[in-house]
Image (spheres, rainbow, N blue to C red):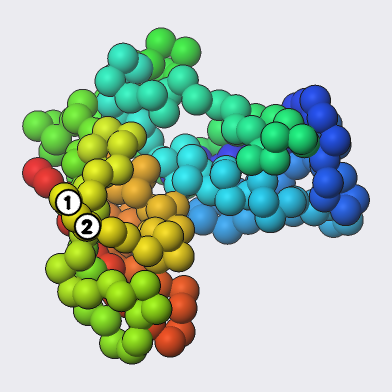
């Protein structure tokens, strides 16, 4: 696992956050926790664009550079087209002892992460998100068995299928990391269930990896 620093590098428009984000504003991510310097802040709208990249960036990237776009992506833009706030994600250090040494410049992994099978390397896994149970009243009419498929960076729905956006945003931050190789002891390797944020619906989704 790596510690990350996320820094505003450019503001090419008018940021509507109050106070507005400015170059040099930053926060760190360490072992899944976000830390903001005293007196600092982060726009929640910008944060929702950053979160899906933070989970895989914290972890080893076992795929080669030409097999995984995550190697090449270091910048994220705020979703506000009037703000055009650009953030840079940097690894600032490794947490604890690690069994792999990664050279991000060349995209080569010099040794595989401990606990990862060699035959599993180099392939972005296809994921299926399946509604496992509905323990309340889902306002989007989700039912057990409803599903979506994530293949590479694209989401597919079965013919005639649908998926609640409110539920999707809850599961989305886990998907980029779940597609990639996870080290033994990583909580994300064993946790595969997510509950929808709507307390009235209590829709539980399961993330399945196609091996």
Quadrant (top left/top right/bottom left/bottom right) for the C terminus: top left
Q: Nearer the viewer, residue 127 or 166?
A: 166
Residue ID at (28%, 68%)? 205
Vertical relation: 147 (above or below) 50: below
Residue ID at (60%, 28%)? 75
Task: Tell me the CA gap for discs 1 and 2.
Answer: 5 Å
Secondary structure of residue under mark 2 = loop
Label 2 near label 1: C-beta < 8 Å? yes
107 relative to 22 in the view: left or right: left
Q: Which mark is residue 161?
A: 2
Report whether residue 71 is seen.
Answer: yes
Task: Tell me residue 125's x, y (percent).
Answer: 20, 39
Task: Tell me residue 68's x, y (percent).
Answer: 33, 24
Residue ID at (28%, 20%)? 67
* Residue 14, quarter of the rendered image: top right
Vertical relation: 78 (above or below) 32: above
Q: Residues within 10 Å of mark 2 (few under 14, many from 20)?
A: few
Q: Which mark is residue 10?
A: none
């Amino acid at each position: 696992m790596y510690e990350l620093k996320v820094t505003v590098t450019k503001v090419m428009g008018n940021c509507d956050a109050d106070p507005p984000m400015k170059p040099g504003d930053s926060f760190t991510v360490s072992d899944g926790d976000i830390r903001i310097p005293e007196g600092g802040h982060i726009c929640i709208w910008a944060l929702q664009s950053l979160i899906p990249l933070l989970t895989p960036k914290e972890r080893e990237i076992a795929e080669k550079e030409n097999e995984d776009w995550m190697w090449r992506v270091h910048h994220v833009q705020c979703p506000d087209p009037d703000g055009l706030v650009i953030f840079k994600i940097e690894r600032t250090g490794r947490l604890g002892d690690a069994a792999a040494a990664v050279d991000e410049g060349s995209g080569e992994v010099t040794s595989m992460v401990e606990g990862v099978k060699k035959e599993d390397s180099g392939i972005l896994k296809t994921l299926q998100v399946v509604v496992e149970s509905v323990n309340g009243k889902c306002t989007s009419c989700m039912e057990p068995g409803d599903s979506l498929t994530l293949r590479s960076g694209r989401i597919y729905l079965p013919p005639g299928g649908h998926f609640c956006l409110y539920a999707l945003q809850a599961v989305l931050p886990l998907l980029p990391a779940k597609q990639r190789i996870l080290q033994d002891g990583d909580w994300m390797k064993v946790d595969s269930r997510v509950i929808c944020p709507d307390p009235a619906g209590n829709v539980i989704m399961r993330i399945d990896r196609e091996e």
